[in-house]
Image (spheres, grey):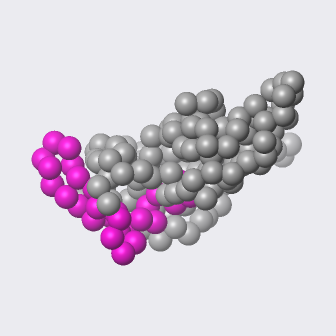
Amino acid sequence: MPKINGNEIRPGNVLEHNGGLWAAVKVDHVKPGKGGAFAQVEMRNLRNGSKLNERFRSADKVERVRLEQKDQQFLYEDDGMLVVMDTETYEQVQLDAELLGDTRPFLQDGMMIVVEYHDAEALNARLPQKVVCNIAETEPVVKGQTAANSFKPAILENGVKISVPPFVGQDEAIVVNTETMEYVERA
C-alpha cells in the first residue's frame, strides 16, 4: 500500500491509522506562528463510525488504502439490512443500512449506489450526488416573490427537512444534493 505525507491527506482519503481504517472527513492545513505547519484531520472509523481528530506533520507518513468500488443496485431493505445486487454478476449481497449514514432517507428502489470494499468487507456506500424527491409539505407559493436568496422550509416525502426557494410549491418534484442536503433545482 502506498504511503503518503501528512500534508497530502485530502477529504475522502481512506487511511490505515492506529490499527483501523479511517476516512478523512475534513482536512484543515494550519500554519501556526511558531513551529511547523501541520494538517488537522477529522477522521471517521469505517468499521464502527467513531470520530477522531489527529494532527499530521508533513514529515509524518501515513498508509493510504485503496478501496475497491463497485456499482450495485438497491433492491429492498430487510430488518435494517440493505439487499443490493452486483450488476455484473447478479450476485445479491446484504449490507448494513448504517453504511449510508445521513443519506439513507434518499435511498429509492432500483437506485444505483457505489459500495466500497476492502478485502471483501463493505465499508462505505454512497448514493448518487443528485436525487429527485417530491415535496410533501411547504408554505404556499407567493406571487411576485423573487428567488433572491430567500428560502422557506419544506418537508420531503422521505421526511427530510430542507430549505427551498419561495417559488417551489407543494407536490413538486425537485432535485436534492445528497452530499449537502440542499435544494439544487426543479426536476
Residue 180 appears in the rendering = no
Counting from the top left corner in percent of width and height, residue 140 is at: 78, 42
Counting from the top left corner in percent of width and height, residue 183 is at: 66, 38
The residue lying toward the viewer, choosing from 185 and 36, is 185
Of all residues shown, which one is farthest toward the left?
89
Dividing the picture into quadrants, the one containing residue 168 is top right
Residue 128 falls inside the magenta stretch: no
Classify residue 179 as left or right of residue 30. Answer: left
Q: Identify the residue at image location x=61%, y=43%.
A: 171
Q: How many marks?
A: 0
Residue 90 appears in the rendering = yes
Q: Quadrant of the C terminus?
A: top right
Counting from the top left corner in percent of width and height, residue 185 is at: 63, 29
Dividing the picture into quadrants, the one containing residue 51 is bottom right
Counting from the top left corner in percent of width and height, residue 43 is at: 57, 57
Of all residues shown, which one is farthest toward the bottom?
79
Residue 86 falls inside the magenta stretch: yes
Q: Identify the residue at image location x=61%, y=38%.
A: 172
The residue lying toward the viewer, choosing from 70 and 97, is 97
Q: Identify the residue at image location x=65%, y=60%.
A: 53
Q: Identify the residue at image location x=79%, y=46%.
A: 139
Classify residue 37 as left or right of residue 186. Answer: right
| Residue stretch rendered in magenta on the structure | 77-103
Classify residue 76 as left or right of residue 27. Answer: left
